Image (cartoon, rainbow, N blue to C red):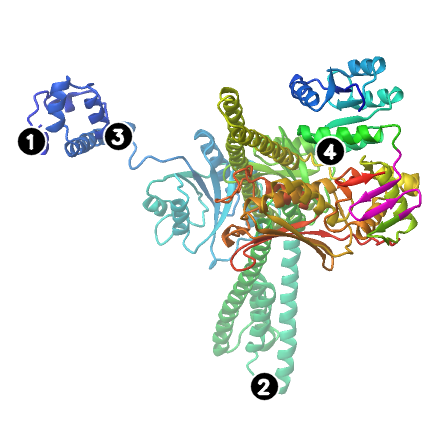
């Protein structure tokens, strides 16, 4: 966050949403940009690329998923989707199409801003995550090593790969399919039981309380994310 | 008027003389309840206010008014009664008015039965299609009618059936008493009997049947039909019966022959043996084995043979000794009497056993028919019974929209040709038999009969024509059809009742939903609106803490609204079959954790404890549905348990299931309510948190869990009279393998 305010493009057809998001974003130190249609959003992003996009999937002129796919052709910045709670498939589709995160409607401003900040941090180009400190847990990516209170945590290669993939995503939700394909290959895209087994084992080894996970979070019906509250990444 | 004075103690000036009643053409009673009258009085509609007040305290006292009202009503009743009597006299009707005409036609087995049936039908036509029944009275102590007469009776029954009448067989020694009893029981208004020159019932204890009937039939008209001069076509004797007859005759000759041989043998051994006894045995045997006529034949033959072979002079019909003449005469009488008696006994035994068989079969059929509660089942049962009774194919057609369609058949659903269907439709629309062996569309391969219940026609039954040949089975089939019609009607009524109940329930549900929507949406909205307007109006005078409090309450109420809308949507999805279940491998610990996270902000001072094994089988479930089910249970636990209590989450395996247990330390649920906690709109009193929605939460949990093939149950109290435990069990999938790294 150097001199200029970060521009956030909000794509939503509800004026009431803009009304409070404008205030909230300004108060949080951002510069909000209002767009009410999918075409308007694509044109705005093409001409003056914002620092992040907040995209409502229910738009009057275009399918939000199409807007997402189209903008991903020429825009690499963070995109956060607004979607209803019971629309898991919609969220999965958006995440697989390149959305960074989603916020369920109706939402509190605090939640949206938290997601936005995580996404913006992730997209800072200079940033390369190497060693993560969470409480007494240290994940050293270059050395493929995990320690807890200085003691080595023994992970199988697959467990480590899974953890590394989650950690590298840096707070982003990874869908079941995404994780399965990248770790086991396209043939196992539907074998969620693999994932459940390894996530369970991983939690047993790294979570302070495996029955109340704080490091690897379950997004029911969608996927997992690694987002500890007190993470220090270096 | 004197009476009025006696009742009220007030002399009325506004009067008319009593004679006005009797001179009036018509009287109309204007009736009003005492309270209403006093009300009108108070409103000033009867007298001016001053007069009214006076009147109300003196004359228009409630007890006066009640007594006067009774007087007026009694007077009116008397007048109406007089008018009724006058009207009846004018129309020449004695006795009470008949509620509706009902005709019974008494037939005797014989050729005149047909004419009687037609007379009954004509009478019914004249009386606007009054229901009519053809009755035959079976007399247990009289021989059954011979084959020809029985056939005529059967034909008459069949005719009645075709013409839209019903048939009944009554039993009784005394025809008049049996018939009158039926007349009384069934409110019969018209009795049709025949008076034939050859009538077997011409006299009965010295009076004719008609005279006896006329004497006893109070309230019913008796029509006597005299025998017409139509040529009578003698009904052919059934073949089987003729063969049996000759078989009996030949056997009786055989019996007599054997008796003769034995008698000859005995005669050789002993001169003075009583040989007549041996012949009597042959008469007895003929009667017992073959009935009345063979016994008579045997008696005659025996007498002749005895005379010819054994009475001196032998080998001639001449009787030598005077004593032998006596012996022969006595023997002949005894033989005839024996033959007649044994034959009768045998005939009756056969008739009884045949009737018993028919009754047993009918009873079995009726049990089978009444055992099925659903229309389709009943139709199937009826088709099976019909097929069994006739030995051929049977089909039952029930209304389908405007038309009728075959719904059940036995042994299987037959393909009916267009001609058959036309006959079936005729039967359906006209309520009369059609198809083969009837006057309507006789070319059809099937015979169709209406299934006429007590209130309406329920359908049509068809029997393959070639199967229905025997008289006995036809009568049985008619009885079956009657039973089937009643059973179908009952099934329809039951279905109607169930529909009405479902409608009533859905109505109740709708009103509960409306109630809940208006309450549970408006309450949070009121808070939001109230808090927001307070902030707008008084923002300058409110301190920071008050503003923060109002803002917090706006947020909380908005969240509550959101949860409630979510519940309504979930319920709609559950009810509307819009539930898209995406079953997947699920670690319930994972889902429990996610559900607990979702309610964490609303816990207040409550703690959530978790007791999960480190190794737990997966279940096949829809993660989001399971999560929502668990969230609803958790929210319920939060709402009904005190602050700073603990909610315990546990998961474990039993033999076939993974069990999730959620326990709170609230007041618990009374045992009487326990079964109903999962019902819609059931909300316990004394919720500590008013933000509970409409009692939909647990109903949704149950719906979701069951949609995934799981079960849900509540137990309460769980310790020291407090606490509720909700158990969800989800089946472990047999194929769930546990992978290890």
The residue nearer to you, when weighing B202 against A118, is: A118
Q: Which residues are magenta?
A: A128-145
How much space separates mark 2 and mark 1, taking CA atoms?
A: 115 Å
The residue nearer to you, when weighing A19 against B226, is: A19
The residue where tag 3 is placed is B84
Mark closest to the chain's N terminus, 1 or 3? 1
**Residue A137 appears left or right of B60:** right
**Which residue corresponds to the image point at 57% horizontal and 61% vertical from the top-left?**
B353
Q: Are marks 2 and 3 in contact (CB under 8 Å)?
A: no
Mark closest to the chain's N terminus, 4 or 3? 3
Q: Are marks 4 and 3 in contact (CB under 8 Å)?
A: no
- Residue A143 covered by magenta stretch: yes
The residue where tag 2 is placed is B271
How far across and down, in percent of the image, does residue A76 sit?
Answer: 87, 24
Residue A100 appears in the figure: no
The residue where tag 1 is placed is B9
Mark closest to the chain's N terminus, 2 or 1? 1
Callout 3 crowding tier (Cα within 10 Å): few <14, some 14–19, many ≥20: few
Q: Which mark is residue B417?
A: 4
Q: Is residue B683 above or below residue B32?
A: below
Mark 3 falls within which chain?
B
Q: Are marks 1 and 3 in contact (CB under 8 Å)?
A: no
Q: Which mark is residue B387?
A: none
């Amino acid at each position: 966050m150097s001199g200029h305010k970060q521009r956030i493009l909000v794509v939503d057809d509800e004026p009431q949403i803009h009304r409070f998001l404008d205030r909230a974003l300004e108060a949080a130190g951002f510069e909000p940009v209002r767009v009410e249609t999918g075409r308007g959003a694509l044109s705005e992003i093409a001409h003056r690329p914002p620092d992040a996009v907040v995209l409502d999937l229910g738009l009057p002129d275009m399918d939000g998923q199409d807007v997402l796919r189209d903008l991903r052709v020429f825009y690499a910045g963070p995109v956060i989707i607004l979607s209803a709670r019971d629309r898991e498939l919609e969220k999965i589709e958006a995440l697989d199409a390149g959305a960074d995160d989603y916020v369920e409607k109706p939402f509190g401003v605090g939640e949206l801003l938290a997601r936005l900040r995580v996404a913006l941090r992730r997209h800072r180009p200079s940033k390369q995550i190497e060693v993560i400190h969470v409480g007494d847990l240290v994940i050293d990516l270059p050395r493929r090593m995990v320690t807890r209170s200085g003691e080595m945590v023994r992970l199988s290669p697959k467990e480590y790969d899974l953890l590394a993939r989650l950690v590298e995503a840096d707070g982003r939700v990874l869908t079941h399919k995404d994780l399965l394909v990248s770790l086991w290959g396209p043939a196992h895209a539907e074998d969620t039981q693999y994932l459940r087994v390894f996530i369970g084992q991983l939690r047993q080894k790294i979570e302070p309380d495996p029955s109340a996970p704080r490091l690897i979070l379950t997004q029911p019906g969608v996927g997992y994310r690694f987002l500890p509250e007190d993470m220090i990444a270096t | 008027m004197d009476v009025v004075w006696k009742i009220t103690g007030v002399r009325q000036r506004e009067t008319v003389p009593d004679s006005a009643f009797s001179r009036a053409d018509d009287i109309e009673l204007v009736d009003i309840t005492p309270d209403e009258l006093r009300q009108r009085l108070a409103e000033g509609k009867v007298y001016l206010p001053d007069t009214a007040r006076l009147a109300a305290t003196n004359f228009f006292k409630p007890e006066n008014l009640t007594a006067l009202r009774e007087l007026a009503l009694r007077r009116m009743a008397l007048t109406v009664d007089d008018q009724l009597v006058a009207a009846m006299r004018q129309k020449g009707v004695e006795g009470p008015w008949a509620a509706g005409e009902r005709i019974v036609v008494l037939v005797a087995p014989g050729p005149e039965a047909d004419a009687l049936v037609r007379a009954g039908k004509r009478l019914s036509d004249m009386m606007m299609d009054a229901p009519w029944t053809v009755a035959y009275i079976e007399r247990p102590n009289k021989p059954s009618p011979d084959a020809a007469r029985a056939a005529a009776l059967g034909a008459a029954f069949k005719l009645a059936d075709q013409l839209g009448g019903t048939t009944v067989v009554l039993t009784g020694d005394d025809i008049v008493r049996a018939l009158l009893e039926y007349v009384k029981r069934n409110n019969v208004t018209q009795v049709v009997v025949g008076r034939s020159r050859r009538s077997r019932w011409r006299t009965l204890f010295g009076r004719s049947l008609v005279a006896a009937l006329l004497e006893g039939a109070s309230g019913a008209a008796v029509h006597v039909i005299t025998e017409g001069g139509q040529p009578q076509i003698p009904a052919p004797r059934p073949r089987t019966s003729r063969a049996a007859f000759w078989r009996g005759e030949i056997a009786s000759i055989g019996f007599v022959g054997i008796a003769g041989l034995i008698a000859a043998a005995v005669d050789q051994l002993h001169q003075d043996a009583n040989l007549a006894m041996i012949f009597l045995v042959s008469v007895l045997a003929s009667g017992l084995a073959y009935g009345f006529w063979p016994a008579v034949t045997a008696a005659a033959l025996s007498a002749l043979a005895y005379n010819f072979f054994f009475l001196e002079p032998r080998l001639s019909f001449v009787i030598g000794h005077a004593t032998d003449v006596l012996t022969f005469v006595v023997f002949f009488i005894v033989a005839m009497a024996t033959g007649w008696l044994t034959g009768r006994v045998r005939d009756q035994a056969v008739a009884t056993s045949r009737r018993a068989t028919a009754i047993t079969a009918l009873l079995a059929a009726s049990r089978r028919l009444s055992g099925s509660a659903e229309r389709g089942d009943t139709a199937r049962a009826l088709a099976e019974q019909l097929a069994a009774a006739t030995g051929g194919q049977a089909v039952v057609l029930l209304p389908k929209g405007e038309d009728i369609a075959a719904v059940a058949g036995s042994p299987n659903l037959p393909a009916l040709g267009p001609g058959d269907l036309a006959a079936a439709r005729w039967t359906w629309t006209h309520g009369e038999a059609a198809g083969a062996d009837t006057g309507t569309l006789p070319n059809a391969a099937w015979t169709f009969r209406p299934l006429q219940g007590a209130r309406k026609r329920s359908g049509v039954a068809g029997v393959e024509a070639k199967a229905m040949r025997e008289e006995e089975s036809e009568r049985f089939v008619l009885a079956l059809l009657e039973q089937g019609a009643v059973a179908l009607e009952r099934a329809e009524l039951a279905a109607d009742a169930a529909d009405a109940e479902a409608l009533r329930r859905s109505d109740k549900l709708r009103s509960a939903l409306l109630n809940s929507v208006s309450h549970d949406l408006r309450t949070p909205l009121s808070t939001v609106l109230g808090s927001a307007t307070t902030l707008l109006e008084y923002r300058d005078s409110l301190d920071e803490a008050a503003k923060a409090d109002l803002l917090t309450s706006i947020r909380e109420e908005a969240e509550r609204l959101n949860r409630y809308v979510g519940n309504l949507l979930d319920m709609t999805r559950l009810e509307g079959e819009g539930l898209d279940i995406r079953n997947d491998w699920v670690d319930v610990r994972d889902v429990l954790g996610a559900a607990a996270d979702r309610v964490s902000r609303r816990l207040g001072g409550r703690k959530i404890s978790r007791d999960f094994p480190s190794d737990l089988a997966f279940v096949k479930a829809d993660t989001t549905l399971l999560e929502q089910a668990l969230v609803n249970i958790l929210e319920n636990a939060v709402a009904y348990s005190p602050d700073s209590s603990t909610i315990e989450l546990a998961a474990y395996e039993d033999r076939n299931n993974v069990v999730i247990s959620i326990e709170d330390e609230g007041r618990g649920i009374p045992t009487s309510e326990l079964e109903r906690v999962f019902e819609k709109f059931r909300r316990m009193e004394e919720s500590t948190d008013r933000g509970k929605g409409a009692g939909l939460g647990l109903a949704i949990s149950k719906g979701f869990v069951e949609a995934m093939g799981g079960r849900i149950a509540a137990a309460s109290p769980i310790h020291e009279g407090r606490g509720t435990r909700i158990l969800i069990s989800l089946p472990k999938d047999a194929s769930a393998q546990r992978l290890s790294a």
